[in-house]
Image (cartoon, rainbow, N blue to C red):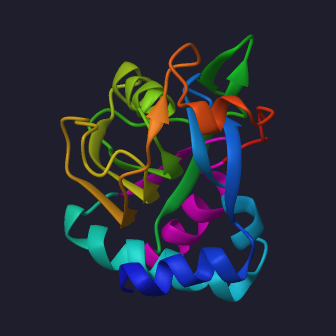
Amino acid sequence: MTTAEALQIFRDSGALLEGHFILRSGLRSRQFFQCALALQQMPIVERLGAALAEQVRPLNAATVIAPAMGGLVIGQEVARQLRSRFIFAEKEEGRLVLRRGFKIAPGERLLVVEDVVTKGGRVQETMDIVRQHGGVVAGVAMVVDRSNGAVDLGVPTVSILRLVVETFEADKLPPDLATLPAVKPGSK
């Protein structure tokens, strides 16, 4: 899948939003990827999942793990495409944890899958969970890399879209953005 094809999917589904957004990282942006809007259509999920699975297949991950909520749909599809197990981490008292009886075997190779990454905080939390349970992080896959590859997670990392999306500190907004009301959308 080309960058142009992926961008068209986001535009056609209304998942690429324009305005003044407060990101999970606290940074502000003119663009927001509401992946859930694109991922509500199973043919799109299948296409994006296949594109990621093709890139990560050589990593030989036994299990795919995704941070809830954003990574759930695409993570499960990547796992389906790879014919591997799927688990997820979810919030408990403000932190991601492994629940629901999910187990990670010592030395088990896991692939972390997320929908959108800006600074990589939730991916890093998920990687920490894998390591705390004795697993090995084989790599990270994401639909949208808003850092254009600037986030270094220390493992093989792939994405469908790698974009330079301007972000700003809340107290350092450009004049045009400062005039717009800030919106904090739900999960990316």
From the viewer's perspective, tell me whether residue 164 is left or right of residue 41: left
Q: Position of residue 57 (x, y in %)?
A: 28, 72
Q: Position of residue 185 (x, y in %)?
A: 78, 41
Queried whether the magenta region covers residue 70, the answer comes back as: yes
Question: Quick one: quadrant of the N terminus?
Answer: bottom left
Q: Quadrant of residue 52?
A: bottom left
Q: Position of residue 25 (x, y in %)?
A: 55, 25
Q: Position of residue 28 (x, y in %)?
A: 58, 31
Q: Residue at x 68, y 38 (%)?
A: 21
Queried whether the magenta region covers residue 104, the answer comes back as: no
Which residues, given as a range, are shown in magenta? Answer: 62-82
Q: Quadrant of residue 63?
A: bottom left
Q: Residue at x 69, y 40 (%)?
A: 20
Q: Residue at x 73, y 32 (%)?
A: 179
The one nearer the camera, 170 or 84, is: 170
Give the answer, above or below, for where 179 lies relative to 86.
above
From the viewer's perspective, tell me whether residue 56 is left or right of residue 167: left
Q: Is residue 102 visible?
A: no
Give the answer, above or below, for where 22 lies relative to 163.
above
The one nearer the camera, 75 or 145, is: 145
Q: Quadrant of residue 82?
A: bottom left
Q: Is residue 3 visible?
A: yes
Q: Residue at x 53, y 35 (%)?
A: 103
